[in-house]
Image (cartoon, rainbow, N blue to C red):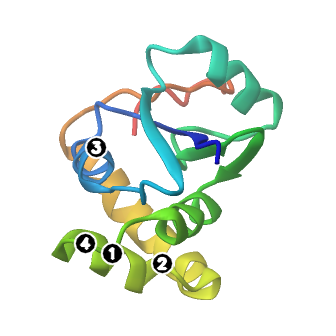
Amino acid sequence: MKLQNIDLVYDTECPSCDFYCKLVRVRESAGVLNLIDARENPEILQEISARGWDIDEGMVLRVEDQLYYGSDAIHTLSLLGTRSGLFNRLNYWMFKSSNRAHLLYPLLKSYRGLLLRILRRTRINNLQVVGKDKF
């Protein structure tokens, strides 16, 4: 059986995103999870931008050739994830339901935005929106 290539594209300068992505695990039978810094990989960012997705507003999960954005990404990742360890069990419980993921993701994203504003982080701004350089 061939393992899937699973890429998780996110902003490593966001402490909450970095924490989450470094703790989340996928089942061995699902494939190999590759963490990709959106600030250092313009190739994948071009594909994301072509879809009109703002990487500052949501992470992207690529499973083989299929892309998932924001709450869909975190939902799919939870289904591929291992259930070992407290963090991964909690992640599965919180996001295994697509409806729950769609409700919780915007709330978590707003807390993330507040944190990044406090930390004075700059946006990646992959869609090159004028005046949208800071959180």
Query: Dot 2: few (<14), some (14–19), or many (≥20) neighbours within 10 Å?
Result: many
Q: What residue is pinned by disc 3?
A: 116
Classify residue 135 by image quadrant.
Answer: top left
Judge left or right: residue 80 versus residue 107: right
Q: Which mark is residue 83?
A: 1
Q: Is residue 124 above or below residue 23?
A: above
Query: Dot 4: few (<14), some (14–19), or many (≥20) neighbours within 10 Å?
Result: few
Judge left or right: residue 21 versus residue 80: left
Circle nearer the N terminus (1, 3) = 1
In contact (CB < 8 Å): disc 4 and disc 1: yes
What residue type is disc 4 on? Answer: Ser
Q: CA distance from mark 4 to mark 1?
A: 4 Å
Q: What residue is pinned by disc 4?
A: 84
What residue type is disc 2 on? Answer: Phe
Q: CA distance from mark 1 to mark 3?
A: 30 Å
Q: Secondary structure at mark 2?
A: helix
In contact (CB < 8 Å): disc 3 and disc 2: no
Q: Position of residue 81 (x, y in %)?
A: 43, 65
Q: CA distance from mark 4 to mark 2?
A: 15 Å
The residue nearer to you, when weighing 79 against 61, is: 79
Nearer to us of marks 1 and 3 is 1
Circle nearer the N terminus (3, 2) = 2
What residue appears at the point 78 percent right and 37 percent down from the top-left corner? 52
